[in-house]
DNA sequence: TGTCGTGATGTGTACGGTCACATTCTGCGG
DNA sequence: CCGCAGAATGTGACCGTACACATCACGACA
């Protein structure tokens, strides 16, 4: 008759079997020096034998360190955030950290409760990928005391940020179209309160102004191919443009589809530029000219920043990665 | 001169200020009955005042419950798993659980260490989205004692599984092509050891055999548009087929691109069917006929299964969701 | 040979909760 | 007005670990 529930072996069980004190076992676990090699070896052996696993909860309780990093991500399943999160998880695991992900909608309350949630988890640091402006209000209100880094931000008032220079990306795309000789350029932007959408739009407007072209009010979209399609249908009613800069690749896909349906050829009649360079973009028809940003790299670098800070490095940092224009078949001279 | 580090308030601080014992505070926290409403109210107020947050580590230590669910996901950033994970996270949070995600490569050691990692985290249950066959060996070897559910599996030897019926999906796609009168049908499958890839392939072969058509050996792909493209280039050298069933939408995208390049029209010359129905599929050119599976629903249902089990329900369950054929423009009569 | 420094190991305690059990406070029937 | 059941609340122990400090053994050195 066995006991209902076998308790997992704890540090004292190990100590007893190894004939040492629990403290010695603890030292072995934490790689402390001043342990006789023979002792260390014996303890290690018992640990293996028992399949002993240190109890993280107990450890966290006493050290006040959870070895966990929180990720606050927008409530989306977009390619970009997803890829970054993935990279963060991998990098964190390699550094002995865990990652606790929580998603949030874009309204203030959701963001706030997401941050609260992570705080309760006692995460040691937070990576914020929710690229909405309200996120900063929430951070301020909550009085976040742990290190955090924001992605997709161009703001300088937070201690750390890490991002692809969206403004530069917007300029790159627009400049490309202008260089091809286009004068009437439309912009399908992202949602209003997305930081990155705003930056891309500003990049667009900057170049338009600089070239002294006719400024057309950007169309605010929602990142989906669906929206791109319907925007395209609408635009076909007054086809007085020769190029369109879409704030992401999906919307570009939808737009091109609508243009095709409407009998307009890309790039012969209309040039289209996307943004992100999702893996599929090269296989759209025509292959999409777009602005590449390396989401995985952003994830990795942001985690590196956080780890640095946890190790005690100080000072703010505002890294920006330059985006890259990838010219394919969806753009042509006017 | 303030103290360097202000200790977060604990349950005894709350008790002192509220003029009750810490046990009473604990009762309030856990919604236990037999608390005088006035007392409860007073304690609640102090909790708010202090901004007190129960320490999860301490709680986990004594209750032996982490309120955390582990997710073991394949080392991919594919649309499907991503969407499911997202749904799981949202559903878990709503039920008061946290989610700890760990990614893994498809080799045995990675899977094994991923499971080990989650076990060390003392997660209460595990959702396994790594749809590789080796995952089952790892589970068996590790002697997983906590509840777990596997996705994308048709195996009956695990206690719980939850999946879209991939076999049926493969049949659906193939049958559709056969019904259109196609006799020479190619299949670009997924990687060898992916369970779902295998099931789709079996579905394909089943229908081919049943219709007594010429069986062509499937081409083993890697899910990427890139592969689809190169496979397409290769296939163009002997264009003796009139239809292709691709094991996912991305490969279909790449294939169609290659076919276009080679001067073959879809669907006039070749019909193409995908699998998954990613949001972009409707805006491919031509719009992709594909087999839809509801990844979010899978995520939610799998979590429901796990929560049921944690609440003490017993018995195995093997839910399967029927996939759905979505006919669009990439298929036409032979 | 006694003292001292140093490496190796052991002991006590705290971390912040929950659980089992003990104790006190109520209101009500006899 | 007492006794008692049941509600309300309090006390002690314990969960598994790390840290601070005490202790021990041993060789070097005066």
Image (spheres, coloured by chain):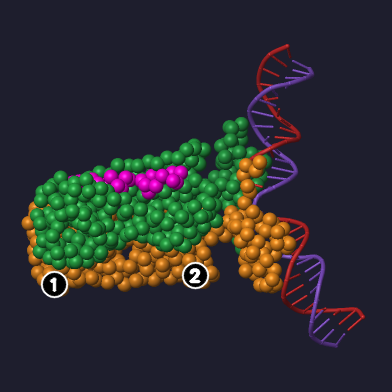
Chain colours: A orange, B green, C red, D purple
Q: Which mark is residue A180?
A: 1
Q: Residue at x 59, y 47 (%)?
A: B64
Asked if residue B197 can be seen in this view, the reply is yes
Chain on which label 2 sits: A
Q: Which residues are magenta?
A: B153-176
Q: For this rendering, which residue is in front, B149 or A91?
A: B149
Residue A151 in magenta stretch: no
Q: Position of residue B14 (x, y in %)?
A: 62, 45
Q: For this rendering, which residue is in front, A328 or B253?
A: B253
Label 2, residues with CA under 10 Å away: few <14, some 14-19, many ≥20: few
Asked if residue A137 can be seen in this view, the reply is no
Q: Which mark is residue A331?
A: none
Q: Position of residue B198 (x, y in %)?
A: 32, 53
Q: Position of residue B143 (x, y in %)?
A: 53, 52
Chain on which label 1 sits: A
Q: For this rendering, which residue is in front, B223 or B175?
A: B175
The residue that disc 2 covers is A308
């Amino acid at each position: 008759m066995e006991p209902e529930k076998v308790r997992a072996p704890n540090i004292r069980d190990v100590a007893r079997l190894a004939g040492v004190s629990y403290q010695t076992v603890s030292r072995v676990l934490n790689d402390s020096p001043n342990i006789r090699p023979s002792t260390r070896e014996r303890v290690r052996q018992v640990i293996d034998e028992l399949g002993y696993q240190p109890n993280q909860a107990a450890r966290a309780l006493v050290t006040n360190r959870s070895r966990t990093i929180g990720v606050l991500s927008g409530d989306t399943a977009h390619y970009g955030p997803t890829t970054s999160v993935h990279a963060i998880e991998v990098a964190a695991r390699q550094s002995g950290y865990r990652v606790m992900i929580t998603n949030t909608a874009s309204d203030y309350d959701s963001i706030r409760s997401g941050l609260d949630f992570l705080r309760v988890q006692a995460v040691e640091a937070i990576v914020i990928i929710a690229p909405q402006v309200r996120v900063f209000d929430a951070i301020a209100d909550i009085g976040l005391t742990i290190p955090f880094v924001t992605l997709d931000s161009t703001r300088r008032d937070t201690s750390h940020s890490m991002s692809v220079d969206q403004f530069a990306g917007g300029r790159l795309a627009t400049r490309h179209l202008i260089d091809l000789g286009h004068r009437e350029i439309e912009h399908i932007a992202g949602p209003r309160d997305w930081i990155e959408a705003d930056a891309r739009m500003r990049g667009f407007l900057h170049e338009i102004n600089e070239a002294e072209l006719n400024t057309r009010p950007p169309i605010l979209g929602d990142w989906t191919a669906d929206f791109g399609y319907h925007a395209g249908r609408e635009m076909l009613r007054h086809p007085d443009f020769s190029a369109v800069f879409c704030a992401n690749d999906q919307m570009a896909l939808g737009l091109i589809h609508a243009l095709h349906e409407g009998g307009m050829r890309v790039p012969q009649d209309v040039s289209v530029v996307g943004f992100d360079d999702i893996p599929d973009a090269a296989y759209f028809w025509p292959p999409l000219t777009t602005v590449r940003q390396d989401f995985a790299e952003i994830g990795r670098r942001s985690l590196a920043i956080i780890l640095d800070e946890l190790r005690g490095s100080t000072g703010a940092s505002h890294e920006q990665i330059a985006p890259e224009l990838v010219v394919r078949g969806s753009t042509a001279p006017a």
